[in-house]
């Protein structure tokens, strides 16, 4: 028995669960057992409006304690843009100057300590969609729902941009293909386009112009990520980028062929609708970018594969996740118990690996990733 | 259970990347480290249960010692049974996984009460996501948006000395109230907010926040300009952390049950060990624990303990942020070979997305250690900028202040000349293939001055010993002295402006005389076991080795696994500060080559020297 490195899921058939939660308490629009579609609203809430703090006491030239007596509206009441909220005391009751509401909303609070009033714009409605086709399994009142579905799941290693959807379009005919802007066409509009080895900045920009929903590639250069975002990505928390297209990278940074299994699975689903998210969080509560192709006609319970065995053992397929041979695939042939000195000089626990091309090598266990699913 | 009965102790530290497990056993020679194992931390999906990683690490320990520690149902076998040769007596754990404790703090003036609030939060083991202040230049609606977006685990509000401003404090509370903040974990709970400001403002703050948050009021952390009272806030933060945050992290309720004592936050455990050493040996210490996501820096100066955490400097999750903050040139100044920026960027990002991978090739190790130097330097810079005297206190003006020469750097209370010991801990320092590499990383990033003892946590077990000390002081002390702290050797570093190639220091070691030149590094092999050697250090005019410019110093010098290290590269300024931009490439590589060879950093590496 040894340590394991959890890998990324590439599963043709699995029972999947998606939690769809509101950022703030609100209303759930569906009930347990309802069949839902990817673009259907399952819950909604009102996000509190923007707040403006106004030091009204100083604007009116009075002490904070006097403020409540001068206000024409009560705390919590609605206000209209241009409506007079208070008058200054003026000279013996004359020359009073008005303070008018700068926008429509509510007068949230008045403080006689600071003389501040808080004004708030009307709430903004937020809709949470189902994201995938499926069935509502659980409803957490006022919070959100859990959707159960069946289909294929592909997890990427890194992504940019939020949730989207579209039919799968195989732009590359092999996982190591390198596509250029000239390979992008107008019939990719609203599609989830599978590129090969790399998504270059030019390709991503052109895809956004063509209104492509999402791009899937094996790798991307970090320099291009910086170019696209306009800043250096320090900590990998993504999902809110506004690139005009969602991006899912399956292998890592640099030109890297899409793993064969992933590519073949995508190919077998060409023309089917996929739900895609680029949101990534590599830290506690990890979030991986994902591609989901639901298949509600399948035999949900029977065909579901057993959960993957998360253990490094002889015979299991692995991906090498560090130089040398970064990105290549192989299988474990032996797991020596005693630590071994590697070229860096460190003494670490290792595994004997046979690459897919037959080459054999000894590598740190930490540099292997199990290929799951 | 009395101390005498405890024969076998299992302790884990759940880091953000790796869960480390040690087994300590009572031998004829007292308590000793028996074996160590580790496994990736499993706070994240697919496991989402920290105990899985703990059990995996325990399994490795069990395998290495050849004794069952877990039963068939993966329960820990307790107590230790000598006859059956199975189990342990107690199990303890520390944790920094799950992103740690994330806080936003606020005060009235950025450099006064807000800074005190920041110190209180950091001292309690928190990561400070942002510091709000009335004078921070942001408009109220911007602060409100910020609080909403950050979703901290907890808020600490200070502001106003007792009897001072009420208005500004309440304004800040209003900002928090308007944001109507929700905690990161579990939206059904109210966000814990601690108010530790002007006591006259307590009632209006209650009025503003009591209904919207889980408000707690403690004593003012800055009762007067001259005084800080951080302890009540720190204790309240730690209490709230266990109650609210830990209880909602994946698998923690299970881990809490599994452990025989309270789970201690890793930084608190490491801090307590460092404080103990400083007190016991009556010395000034600077210590560091460099992790995957964060780097903690500790200092104990004249008995005063300070800790900072650099939330986004680390060797895995935060790897890419180190590069973004330091910049390409600062990283590459330590690297003795060429690497295209595009290639380097990709390698750094690949480490970030696969944080548990380790360098296999020597060149990869050199790159990783270059990054470590920058992560340590940046974290130490943050520590120095926080450890300052209290602002707002009237002080006698010195000449520098009179002429407006005071700056951030000179305000720090950390004077490296006064620091007696630097302690390194964390994977990249503890597990460096050669201790020489560790010593050089510590010197390059902390730039010790005068005579400083360099040490390292042998296999990165200070967190576990910190928690053990609270339960079994004897075992913790014995293991600490025999198996944990490794003496690398004393570093002797003269301070002052130097001219290239000129002699700067004569070192007389009981008749054995060495002459140190500017830009030179020298190692005098000597082990710790050989004991001290009487040394006379004579700097040239204008150079300080501890007693003032040009004045000699007599002291005892100790060796270690590396030896006595003489560093003639200069301090204030450090001659290699902007090596990649100010020196010719050939000069830079030639320096690296000489130092690498003198310290025997990377034996067999032939690429040095370009």
Image (spheres, coloured by chain):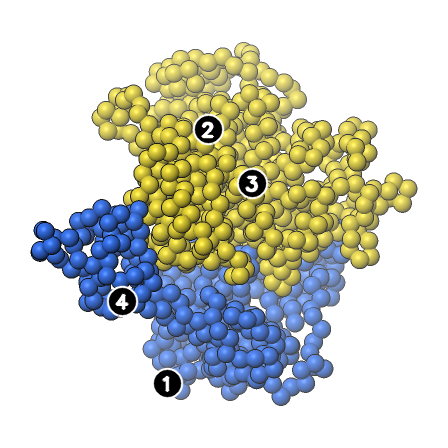
Chain colours: A blue, B yellow
Q: Which mark is residue B267?
A: 3
Asked which secondary structure carries label 3, the reply is helix
Indicate the chain on which mark 1 is placed.
Answer: A
CB atoms of marks 3 and 4 within 8 Å:
no
Residue B195 lies left or right of residue A98; in this view the side is right
Badge nearest the viewer, 1 or 3: 3
Q: Position of residue B301 (x, y in %)?
A: 48, 26
Tag 2 and tag 1 share a subunit: no
Q: Residue at the spot x=72%, y=53% of the render?
A: B55
Q: Please, is residue B184 above or below residue B118 in the view?
A: below
Q: Which residue is mark 1?
A: A186
Q: Are marks 3 and 4 on the same chain?
A: no
Gap in Å between the C-alphas at discs 4 and 1? Answer: 48 Å
Where does residue B587 sit, x and y in percent of width and height? 38, 38
The x and y percentages for residue A301 are 70, 81
Density class for disc 4 (Cα within 10 Å; few <14, some 14-19, many ≥20) is many
Residue at image coords 73%, 62%: A313
Q: Residues within 10 Å of mark 3 (few under 14, many from 20)?
A: many
Q: Chain of mark 4?
A: A
Residue indicated by mark 4: A79
The image shows residue A332, relative to residue B380, as above or below, that is: below
In which quadrant of the rendered view does residue B602 lie? top right
- Name the subunit of mark 3: B
| Distance between the alpha carbons at the discs numbered 3 and 2 | 23 Å
């Amino acid at each position: 028995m040894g340590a394991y490195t959890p890998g990324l899921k590439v599963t043709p058939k699995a029972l999947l669960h998606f939690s769809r939660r509101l950022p703030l308490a609100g209303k759930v629009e569906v009930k347990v057992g309802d069949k839902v579609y990817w673009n259907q609203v399952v819950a909604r809430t009102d996000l509190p409006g923007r707040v403006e703090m106004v030091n009204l006491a100083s604007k009116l030239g009075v002490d904070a304690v006097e403020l409540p007596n001068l206000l024409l509206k009560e705390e919590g009441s609605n206000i209209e843009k241009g409506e007079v909220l208070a008058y200054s005391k003026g000279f013996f009751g004359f020359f009073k100057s008005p303070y008018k509401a700068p926008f429509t909303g509510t007068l949230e609070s008045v403080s006689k300590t600071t003389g501040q009033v808080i004004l708030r714009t009307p709430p903004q409605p937020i809709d949470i969609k189902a994201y995938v086709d499926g069935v509502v399994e659980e409803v957490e009142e006022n919070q959100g729902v859990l959707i159960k579905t069946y289909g294929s799941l592909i997890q990427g290693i890194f992504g940019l941009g939020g949730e989207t959807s579209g039919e799968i379009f195989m732009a590359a005919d092999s996982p190591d293909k390198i596509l250029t802007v000239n390979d992008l066409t107008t019939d990719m509009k609203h599609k989830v386009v599978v590129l090969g080895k790399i998504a270059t900045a030019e390709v991503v920009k052109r895809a956004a112009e063509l209104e492509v929903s999402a791009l899937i590639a094996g790798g991307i250069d970090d320099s291009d990520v910086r170019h696209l975002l306009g800043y250096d990505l320090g900590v990998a928390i993504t999902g809110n980028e506004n690139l005009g297209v969602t991006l899912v990278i399956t292998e890592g940074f640099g030109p890297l062929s899409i793993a064969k299994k992933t590519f073949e699975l995508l190919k077998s689903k060409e023309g089917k609708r996929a739900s895609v998210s680029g949101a990534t969080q590599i830290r506690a509560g990890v979030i991986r970018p994902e591609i989901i192709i639901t298949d509600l006609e399948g035999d949900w319970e029977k065909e579901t594969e057993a959960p993957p065995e998360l253990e490094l053992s002889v015979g299991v397929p692995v991906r090498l996740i560090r130089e040398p041979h970064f990105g290549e695939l192989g299988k474990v042939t032996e797991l020596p118990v005693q630590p071994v000195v590697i070229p860096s000089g460190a003494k670490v626990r290792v595994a004997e690996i046979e690459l897919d091309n037959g080459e054999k090598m000894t590598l740190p266990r930490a540099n292997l990733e199990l290929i799951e699913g | 259970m009395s101390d005498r009965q405890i024969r076998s102790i299992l302790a884990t530290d759940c880091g953000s990347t790796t869960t480390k497990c040690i087994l300590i056993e009572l031998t004829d020679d007292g308590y000793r480290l028996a074996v160590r194992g580790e496994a990736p931390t499993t706070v994240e999906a697919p496991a989402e249960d920290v105990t899985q990683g703990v059990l995996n690490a325990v399994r490795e320990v069990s395998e290495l010692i050849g004794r069952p520690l877990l039963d068939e149902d993966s329960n820990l076998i307790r107590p230790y049974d000598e006859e059956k040769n199975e189990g342990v007596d107690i199990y303890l754990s520390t944790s920094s996984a799950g992103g740690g404790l994330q806080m936003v703090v606020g005060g009235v003036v950025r450099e006064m009460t807000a800074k005190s609030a920041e110190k209180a939060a950091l001292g309690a083991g928190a990561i400070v996501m942002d510091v709000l202040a009335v004078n921070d230049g942001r408009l109220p609606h911007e602060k409100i948006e910020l609080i909403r977006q950050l979703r901290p685990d907890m808020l600490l509000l200070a502001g106003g000395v007792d009897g001072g401003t009420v208005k500004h404090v309440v304004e800040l509370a209003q900002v928090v109230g308007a944001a109507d903040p929700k905690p990161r974990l579990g939206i059904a709970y109210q966000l814990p907010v601690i108010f530790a400001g002007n006591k006259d403002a307590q009632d209006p703050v209650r009025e503003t926040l009591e209904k919207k948050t889980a408000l707690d009021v403690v004593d003012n952390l800055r009762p007067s300009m001259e005084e800080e009272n951080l302890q009540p806030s720190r204790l309240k933060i730690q209490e709230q952390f266990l109650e609210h945050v830990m209880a909602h992290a994946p698998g923690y309720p299970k881990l809490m049950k599994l452990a025989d004592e309270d789970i201690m936050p890793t930084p608190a455990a490491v801090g307590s060990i460092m404080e103990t050493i400083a007190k016991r040996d009556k010395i000034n210490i600077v210590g560091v624990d460099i992790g995957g996501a964060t780097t903690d820096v500790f200092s104990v100066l004249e008995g005063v303990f300070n800790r900072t955490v650099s939330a986004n400097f680390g060797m895995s999750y935060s790897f890419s942020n180190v590069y973004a903050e330091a910049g390409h040139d600062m990283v590459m100044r330590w690297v003795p070979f060429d690497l295209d920026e595009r290639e380097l960027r990709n390698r750094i990002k690949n480490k970030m997305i696969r944080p548990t991978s380790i360098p296999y090739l020597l060149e990869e190790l050199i790159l990783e250690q270059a990054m470590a130097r920058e992560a340590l330097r940046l974290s130490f810079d943050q520590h120095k900028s926080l450890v300052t005297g209290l602002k707002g206190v009237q002080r006698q003006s010195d000449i520098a202040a009179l002429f407006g020469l005071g700056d951030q750097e000179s305000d720090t209370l950390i004077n490296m000349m006064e620091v007696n010991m630097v302690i390194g801990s964390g994977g990249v320092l503890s597990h460096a293939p050669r201790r020489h590499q560790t010593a050089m990383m510590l010197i390059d990033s902390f730039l010790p001055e005068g005579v400083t003892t360099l040490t390292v946590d042998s296999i990165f077990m200070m967190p576990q010993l910190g928690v053990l000390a609270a339960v079994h002081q004897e075992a913790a002390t014995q293991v600490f002295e025999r198996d944990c702290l490794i003496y690398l050797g004393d570093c002797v570093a003269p301070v002052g402006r130097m001219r290239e190639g000129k002699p700067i220091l004569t070192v007389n070691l009981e008749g054995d005389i060495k002459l140190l030149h500017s830009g030179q590094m020298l190692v005098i092999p000597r082990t710790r076991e050989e004991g001290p050697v009487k040394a006379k250090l004579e700097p040239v005019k204008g150079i300080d080795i501890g007693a003032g410019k040009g004045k000699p110093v007599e002291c005892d010098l100790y060796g270690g696994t590396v030896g006595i290290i003489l560093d003639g590269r200069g301090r204030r300024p450090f001659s290699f500060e902007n090596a990649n931009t100010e020196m010719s490439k050939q000069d830079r590589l030639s320096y690296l080559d000489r130092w690498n060879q003198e310290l025997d950093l990377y034996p067999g590496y032939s690429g040095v020297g370009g």
